[in-house]
């Protein structure tokens, strides 16, 4: 999945095999997200890795999309370092969930090697999505 799923547009997204049951969206690849808020979106853990680890695991436009949801507006590339500092100090739930999971993956696999971590994320965590909510 390259774009976030927003509950407001889930019925028009290309999700032919996904099922929405009121409070949850069950994704066809086995992932699941609970209670998507109005101003929120799901992002793959691999995309959030860039923010919590500091090494670029996805495109800059994906990072801009994450921060676009978080800020509730379009984000320019030059703003990304300051926004990373902001989430590191504010510690929103989505950031902490991603941070803990990434640190667990590093610990469990005894590695901080970027190539190995990306391979692990692709093979074992490709169906893990975390909901990013707009800061209020």
Image (cartoon, grey):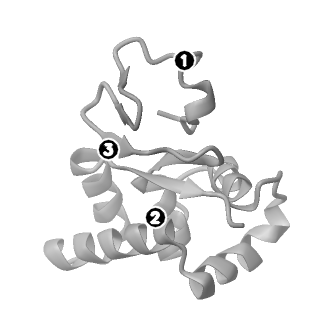
Instruction: Identify the residue under disc 3.
Output: 126
Q: Considering the numbered disc 1 on the image, is that residue within a helix, a strand or a loop?
A: loop
**Residue sitting at x 43%, y 45%:** 35
Q: Is residue 49 left or right of residue 118?
A: right
* Residue 83 versus residue 5 in the image, above or below: below
Of the pair 124 and 40, the residue shown nearer to us: 40
Which residue has dot 2 on it? 49
Label 3–label 1 contact, CB within 8 A: no
- Percent x, y of residue 51: 55, 69
The picture places residue 66, in percent across and down from the top left corner, at: 63, 54
| 66 lies left or right of 52 | right
> Which numbered tag is attached to residue 98?
none
Q: Determine whether label 2 and label 3 are within 8 Å by CB.
A: no
Depth check: give the residue in front, 24 or 69. 24
- Please, is residue 96 above or below residue 5 in the view? below
Q: Estimate the spatial distance between the alpha carbons at disc 2 and disc 1, rounded to whole Å.
A: 28 Å
Crowdedness near tag 1: few (<14), some (14–19) or many (≥20) residues, C-alpha within 10 Å: some
Q: Is any atom of residue 33 visible in this view?
A: yes
Report the residue at 30% width, 24% height from top.
28
Q: Whole-Å distance between the Cαs marked 3 and 1?
A: 23 Å
**Is the C terminus in the top left, top right, bottom left or bottom right quadrant?**
bottom right
Residue 112, picture quadrant: bottom left
Is tag 3's residue or tag 1's residue first in the polypeptide sequence?
Answer: 1
Name the side, left or right, on which 88 lies relative to 116: right
Residue at point 24% right, 69% down?
105
Tell me the residue that label 1 is attached to. Answer: 11
């Amino acid at each position: 999945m390259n774009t976030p799923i927003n509950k407001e547009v889930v019925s028009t997204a290309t999700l032919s095999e996904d099922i929405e049951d009121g409070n949850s969206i069950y994704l066809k690849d086995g992932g699941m997200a609970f209670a998507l808020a109005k101003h929120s979106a799901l992002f793959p853990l691999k995309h959030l890795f860039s923010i919590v680890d500091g090494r670029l695991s996805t495109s800059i436009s994906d990072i801009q999309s994450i921060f676009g949801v978080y800020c509730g507006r379009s984000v320019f590339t030059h703003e990304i370092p300051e926004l990373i500092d902001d989430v590191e100090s504010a510690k929103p739930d989505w950031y902490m969930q991603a941070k803990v999971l990434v640190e667990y993956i590093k610990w469990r696999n005894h590695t901080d090697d970027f190539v190995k971590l990306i391979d692990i994320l692709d093979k074992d965590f490709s169906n893990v999505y975390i909901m990013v909510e707009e800061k209020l």
